[in-house]
C-alpha cells in the first residue's frame, strides 16, 4: 500500500505541476465561457436586429387577393411583371420573389439570387399558408377569431402526490449532462493513462521502476493518481466556468441590451416570462442536490477506475499508439452503448426494465445511472450498482494486472488477443 501511495503522489504532483495541465485548467473554462458568450451575443444580436427583407409577390391568379403579408422581418409588395422583379433581384434591390402558380395558392415558387435558410423558407411558407387559411375562412363565412376562441390551450403540469412538480425536463437535462461529463473524462484521462504506460514502456523507464515496486502496484498507483488529477481539473473547471459565465453574462447584457430593449421585451411577454421563470425554479427545487453530487462522485470514480484499468492493460501490451486501435473498440463500445441507452431509453422511461439493468451492468452503469439519478431512484439501487461497479473494478484490476505485469516488459512482438489471453492464463 505504501508503494501505491508513493506512485499515486508522484503521478499526481508530476501531472498537476506540468505547464500543459495548468494552461488547460485555466484555458478550458475560458474557452467554455467564450463559447457560450458568443452564442449569447449572437442570440441577442439576432433578437434585436431590425433588418427587414424586401420580397416581391407575383400572383397572376389573385390567390392572395392582394392581402398584406408584411411583418417585422419581411416587407412584401405585389408586382405585375415577373421579369422586372427578377431584374430587381439581380441588382439586389429586393431579396426574392414568391410566384403563386395557381388560384388555390398551394403551389409556390421562390426565386432568389442567394441561397435561403431552411428557417426563412419555413417562415415564408407559414406566412402564405396562414393568409390563405384566413381567406378561405372568410370565403366560407367563418371568422378566424371565432375559431381561435373555440381552441383550448392546455397547460399540463405534472406533480407528485406531495404536490411538488416532478421536474421531468430539468431532471432529464441534468442527468444527461452529467453522463456526458463522465463519458468525456473517462475517455480523456483513460487514454492519458494508456499513452503514459506505452511511453514509459518504450523509454525503458519502467524496467527501473519495476525493480523497486511490483507491476500491480505501479498500475494501481498510476490509475489512482490520474483519477485525482482528473477530479482536480474537473472541480477547477466547474468553479472557474461558473465565475466566468457569470461575468460574461453581465458584460454582454450590459453591452448589448439597453433599457429600451428590456422594456420592450417585458411589455411583449411579461406573463410568459414570469411563467417560464416560475416553472424553472419549481423544477429546480425538485432536484436532490446532495444525492446528485454523491452519485456523480461515486460513478465518476467507479467508471474511471474500471476503464482506466482496461486502458492501462492495453497500454502495457502494445508498443505504439497505432497498435491500440484494435483494442480500443471492444473497450469503448460498452460505454458508448450506455450513452445511447441513456439518451434513447432512460430519458423516455428512467424506471424501465432496460434502464434498470443497464444501470446495474458495471460497464454501462456510470453513464446510465447518472441519467437516472435525478429521477429519485432509491439509495438501495445506487448502493447495489456502486457495489457491483467497484467489485467489477477489483476483478478487472486483477485481470489487467496479469496482462500488465507481463506486457509491460514485452518488446518487439505485435500484441494480439491470443497473446493477451495467454498472459491472463499464465501463473
Image (cartoon, grey):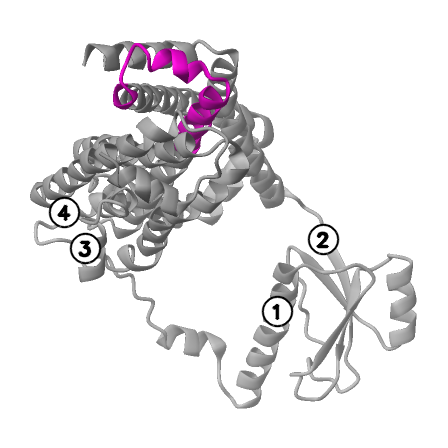
The residue identified by callout 2 is 52
Distance CA(mark 3)–CA(mark 1)? 49 Å
Q: Secondary structure at mark 2?
A: loop
Distance CA(mark 2)–CA(mark 1)? 15 Å
Q: Secondary structure at mark 1?
A: helix
Q: Nearer the viewer, residue 271 or 277?
A: 277
Local crowd size for mark 4, using a 10 Å CA cut-off: few (<14), some (14–19), many (≥20): some
Q: Which residues are magenta?
A: 188-217
Does residue 4 belong to the magenta stretch?
A: no
Q: Earlier in the sequence, mark 2 or mark 3?
A: 2
Q: Main secondary structure of the magenta part?
A: helix
The residue identified by callout 3 is 357
Q: Is residue 122 left or right of residue 204?
A: right
The residue identified by callout 4 is 377
Q: Nearer the viewer, residue 95 or 367?
A: 367
Does residue 191 belong to the magenta stretch?
A: yes
The residue identified by callout 1 is 127
Q: Is residue 67 left or right of residue 392?
A: right
Q: Earlier in the sequence, mark 1 or mark 4?
A: 1
Distance CA(mark 2)–CA(mark 3)? 55 Å
Q: Which quarter shows the N terminus? A: top left
Marks 3 and 4: which is nearer the front? 3
Residue 266: image x %, image y %?
Answer: 46, 42
Residue 150: image x %, image y %?
Answer: 36, 77
Disc assigned to residue 297? none
Marks 2 and 3: which is nearer the front? 3
Q: Which quarter shows the C terminus? A: top left
Q: Earlier in the sequence, mark 2 or mark 1?
A: 2
Amino acid at each position: 500500500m505504501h508503494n501505491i501511495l508513493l506512485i499515486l503522489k508522484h503521478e499526481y504532483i508530476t501531472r498537476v505541476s506540468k505547464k500543459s495541465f495548468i494552461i488547460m485548467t485555466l484555458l478550458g473554462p475560458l474557452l467554455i465561457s467564450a463559447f457560450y458568450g458568443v452564442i449569447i451575443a449572437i442570440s441577442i444580436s439576432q433578437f434585436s436586429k431590425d433588418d427587414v427583407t424586401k420580397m416581391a409577390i407575383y400572383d397572376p391568379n389573385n390567390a392572395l387577393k392582394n392581402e398584406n403579408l408584411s411583418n417585422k422581418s419581411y416587407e412584401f409588395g405585389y408586382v405585375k411583371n415577373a421579369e422586372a422583379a427578377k431584374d430587381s433581384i439581380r441588382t439586389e434591390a429586393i431579396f426574392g420573389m414568391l410566384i403563386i402558380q395557381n388560384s388555390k395558392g398551394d403551389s409556390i415558387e421562390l426565386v432568389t439570387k442567394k441561397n435561403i435558410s431552411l428557417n426563412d423558407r419555413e417562415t415564408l411558407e407559414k406566412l402564405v399558408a396562414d393568409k390563405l387559411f384566413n381567406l378561405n375562412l372568410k370565403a366560407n363565412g367563418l371568422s378566424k377569431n371565432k375559431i381561435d376562441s373555440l381552441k383550448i390551450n392546455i397547460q399540463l403540469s405534472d406533480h407528485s402526490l406531495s404536490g411538488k412538480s416532478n421536474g421531468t425536463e430539468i431532471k432529464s437535462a441534468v442527468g444527461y449532462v452529467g453522463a456526458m461529463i463522465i463519458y468525456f473524462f473517462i475517455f480523456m484521462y483513460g487514454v492519458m493513462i494508456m499513452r503514459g504506460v506505452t511511453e514509459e514502456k518504450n523509454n525503458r523507464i519502467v524496467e527501473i521502476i519495476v525493480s523497486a515496486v511490483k507491476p500491480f502496484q505501479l498500475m494501481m498507483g498510476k490509475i489512482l493518481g490520474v483519477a485525482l488529477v482528473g477530479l482536480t481539473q474537473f472541480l477547477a473547471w466547474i468553479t472557474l466556468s461558473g465565475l466566468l459565465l457569470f461575468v460574461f453574462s453581465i458584460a454582454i447584457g450590459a453591452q448589448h441590451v439597453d433599457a429600451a430593449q428590456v422594456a420592450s421585451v417585458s411589455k411583449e411577454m411579461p406573463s410568459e416570462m414570469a411563467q417560464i421563470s416560475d416553472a424553472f425554479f419549481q423544477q429546480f427545487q425538485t432536484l436532490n442536490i446532495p444525492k446528485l453530487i454523491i452519485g456523480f462522485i461515486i460513478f465518476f470514480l467507479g467508471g474511471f477506475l474500471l476503464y482506466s484499468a482496461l486502458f492501462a492493460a492495453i497500454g502495457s501490451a502494445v508498443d505504439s499508439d497505432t497498435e491500440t486501435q484494435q483494442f480500443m473498440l471492444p473497450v469503448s463500445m460498452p460505454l458508448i452503448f450506455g450513452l445511447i441507452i441513456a439518451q434513447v431509453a432512460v430519458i423516455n422511461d428512467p424506471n424501465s426494465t432496460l434502464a434498470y439493468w443497464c444501470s446495474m451492468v458495471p460497464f454501462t452503469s456510470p453513464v446510465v445511472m447518472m441519467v437516472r439519478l435525478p429521477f429519485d431512484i432509491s439509495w438501495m439501487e445506487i448502493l447495489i450498482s456502486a457495489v457491483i461497479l467497484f467489485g467489477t473494478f477489483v476483478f478487472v484490476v486483477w485481470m489487467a494486472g496479469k496482462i500488465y505485469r507481463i506486457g509491460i516488459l514485452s518488446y518487439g512482438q505485435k500484441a494480439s488477443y491470443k497473446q493477451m489471453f495467454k498472459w491472463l492464463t499464465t501463473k
